[in-house]
Amino acid sequence: MIIIIIGPPGSGKGTVSERLAKEFGFFHLSPGELLREEVKKATIIGKEIQRYIEKGQLVPTHFVAEMLKLELKGKKKVVLDGFPRSLEQAESIQEIKIDRVINLDVSEKQVIERFAGRRICSKGTHGYHLQYLPPKKPGVCDEDGTLLVQRQDDKPEVIKQRFNVYHQESRPVLKYYQKKVQNVDAGKSPDEVYEQVKKILRL
Ligand SMILES: [Zn+2]
């Protein structure tokens, strides 16, 4: 069973994928992660990727698609997280039989609220949440005493921007897979979202 999980930033794709991997033995395939690993291991492919990155270019779709196909070989249960993001990418893996596409549907407003309370220390090491994981002393990191700040990616204007890009790119992808798409209300709690996903997959 090969599943694609799709959703805007902050919809919880990674969390759902990890839980499926842990509980049901799905292989969690995140192409971004895969690329980073190849670079780190300095394989032939990794060096090629490095060259694109150094030139400030995107790694070509066909290249990522070939890597994915290799990685998918022989694996029976896979959750694909973060790919395809565009119609071009979807078409690049058209020979792979996709069983289900889970669309984590969450509004921009909900993600902005979800991220509003997140803080990180100035060293960029320790994460907090004003509501769920507050520091002992307001505004200061428990571990190193540096000031807590909001991550750039968590700011409303940045989230709005990323949502726009996401919707433009994902609309044709959802249409491409329309018969396989199942919508999940990802505005709910992580547990509720996960339950919805399990139900769809009959797990
Ligand atoms: Zn810290």
Image (cartoon, helix red, strand yellow):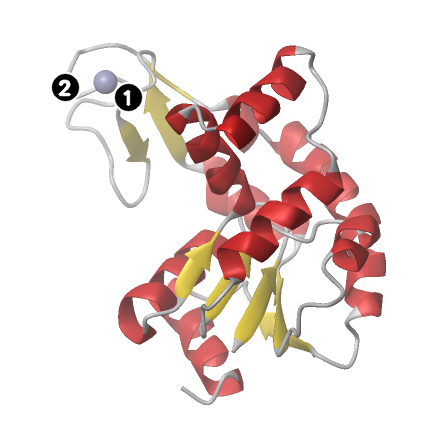
The answer to whether residue 163 is seen in the rendering is no
Query: Horizontally, is 139 left or right of 7 in the view?
Result: left
Q: Residue at x 56, y 70 (%)?
A: 3
Number of numbered discs on residues: 2
In this figure, which residue is indicated by the disc labeled 1? 125
Mark 2 CB in 8 Å range of ligand 1?
yes
Percent position of residue 87, x then y = 82, 54
Q: Is residue 49 left or right of residue 15?
A: right
Q: Residue at x 32, y 37 (%)?
A: 129
Q: Residues within 10 Å of mark 1 (few under 14, many from 20)?
A: few
Compared across the picture, whether 98 is left or right of 194 comes to: right
* Residue type, mark 1 in image: Thr
Q: Is residue 191 left or right of residue 89?
A: left
Q: Which residue is label 2 attached to?
A: 143
Under circle 2, the secondary element is: loop
Marks 1,2: beta carbons within 8 A: yes
Q: Amino acid at mark 2?
A: Glu
* Front-most of residues 82 and 91: 91
Quarter containing the C terminus: bottom left
Q: Quadrant of ligand 1?
A: top left
65 or 191: nearer the viewer: 65
Q: Secondary structure at mark 1?
A: loop
